[in-house]
Image (cartoon, helix red, strand yellow):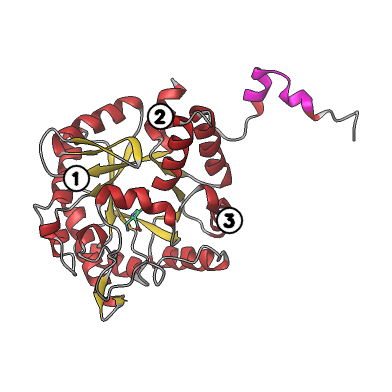
Amino acid sequence: MYPLRRNRILRHSNAIRHLVRETIITPSDFLVPLFVVEGNGVKDEIPSMPNYFRLSLDNLAKEVKELWNMGLCAVLLFVKVPDNLKDNTGSEALNEHGLMQRAIKTVKDACPDMLVMTDVALDPYSTFGHDGIVSNGIILNDATNEILAEMSISHAKAGADFVAPSDMMDGRIQIIREALEDEELTTTGIMSYAAKYASAFYGPFRDALDSAPSTSGDAPKDKQTYQMDPANRFEAVKEAEMDVEEGADIIMVKPGICYLDIVREVKNAVDVPVAVYQVSGEYAMLKAAAERGWLDHDAVMMAQLIAIKRAGANIIASYFAKDAVALMG
Ligand code: PBG
C-alpha cells in the first residue's frame, strides 16, 4: 500500500528498467518473410510495402547471407508465379524444378544453417487466387488437402525444414503429417496457420504476389468460407487445439496487432510454440504514417513487436525483422 509500495522505484533509471524488463526482443525471435520472383538481378520494390522487395534467386542468395550475418536465422518463402503457369489445381506447385523448389535450394546453398519454412497454399498458383480448388462457386476441401500434402512433400524433398500451410482447409495438418511420414520425411516440421482470419490486412501481400481472389467468373470473391471470422475468439482455440492433435509443431495466429487477445488465448491453450504473423497491411500502415511524419517509425515498430511477444508469441513473422535488428545494433 502507498507509500510503502512506490511503484515508480522500478522505473527510476535505465538500469533498473532493464533489470526488471519482462519482455526482450532478440534476432532469433524473427521469421523473415521473403518474396521470390523469376529472373536475374531483380529487386522490385513492392509499391504498397515501402523498402520491401521481390527478389530473383541471385538476390535471394545475397539477402539470406545478409540476414544470417545479422543474426536472423529463419525465413518464410513465398513465390510470385507467372500467370501462364496458373491453373485451378495449382499444378505448377508440384513442379520439382518450380520457383519455390529452386528458392529452397538457393537458400540452403547460400546459407546451409538458415531455417527454411515454405508457404503451402494454392493461391499464388491459382487462376482464381484461392487457397483451394474452385468448383461450382465453392472451395473444395478434401481434394485441396491431397494437393497440399503433395506440395509439402515436394518442398521437404527440395530441402525445406518446415512447411507452413496457410490455406485453412479442414484436416490438412493430419493429411500433411501422414504424407510426410509415408515418405519418411520425419524431420520436416509443420507450422500451421491455425487461427488465420479473413482480413483486409493482407492487401499489400496480394499486390506483391498478384494473388488476390478473382473478381470475375463464379469463384468466391473473398476467402470467408475458409479463413476465420474476425468476430470470433472461441473458434481460434478450437482450430489451434485440433491442429496440435493433428500433428502441428508450431501454431500461428494471424494477423498480429489486432489479434493479441487471440494470441494469449491460444498460448494458454496449447503446449507448442506460438507464432504470430505481423502481416503486410500492418507493415504498410506504419510505413505510410512514418512517411508523413505522423508516427515515429522505430519507436512504434518496437512497441508493436514488444506487444506481440508480450502477448505470447514465441516466434514473430514480420517484415520489420531487418529494421528491428538493425536498430538493436
Ligand atoms: C497465402 C497467404 C496470405 C498471407 C500469407 N499467406 C494471403 C492470403 O491468405 O490471402 C498474408 C500475409 C501478409 O499479408 O503479410 N495463403
To which residue does mark 3 refer? Answer: 268
**Of the pair 154 and 52, the residue shown nearer to us:** 52
The boundaries of the magenta stretch are: 8-18
To which residue does mark 2 refer? Answer: 323
Q: Earlier in the sequence, mark 1 or mark 3?
A: 1
On screen, residue 124 above or below 170: above
Do we see residue 184 in this rendering?
no
Nearer the observer, disc 3 or disc 2?
A: 2
Work out which residue is located at the far bottom of the displayed protein and give it: 136
| Left or right, residue 147 beside residue 243 | left
Based on the displayed image, in which of its 4 quarters is residue 318 positioned?
top left
**Of the pair 225 and 176, the residue shown nearer to us:** 225
Do we see residue 221 in this rendering?
yes
Please tell me whether mark 2 sits on a helix, a strand or a loop: helix
How would you rate the neighbour count of disc 1 (Cα within 10 Å): few for under 14, some for 14-19, many for 20 or more? many
Question: What amino acid is labelled 1 in the image?
Answer: Ile
Residue 9's disc is none
Quarter occupied by the C terminus: top left
Q: Quadrant of ligand 1?
A: bottom left
Q: Do the residues under discs 3 and 2 have CB atoms within 8 angstroms?
A: no
Q: Earlier in the sequence, mark 3 or mark 2?
A: 3
| Left or right, residue 190 beside residue 257 | left
Question: Residue at left 14%, top 34%?
Answer: 58
Please tell me whether mark 1 sits on a helix, a strand or a loop: helix
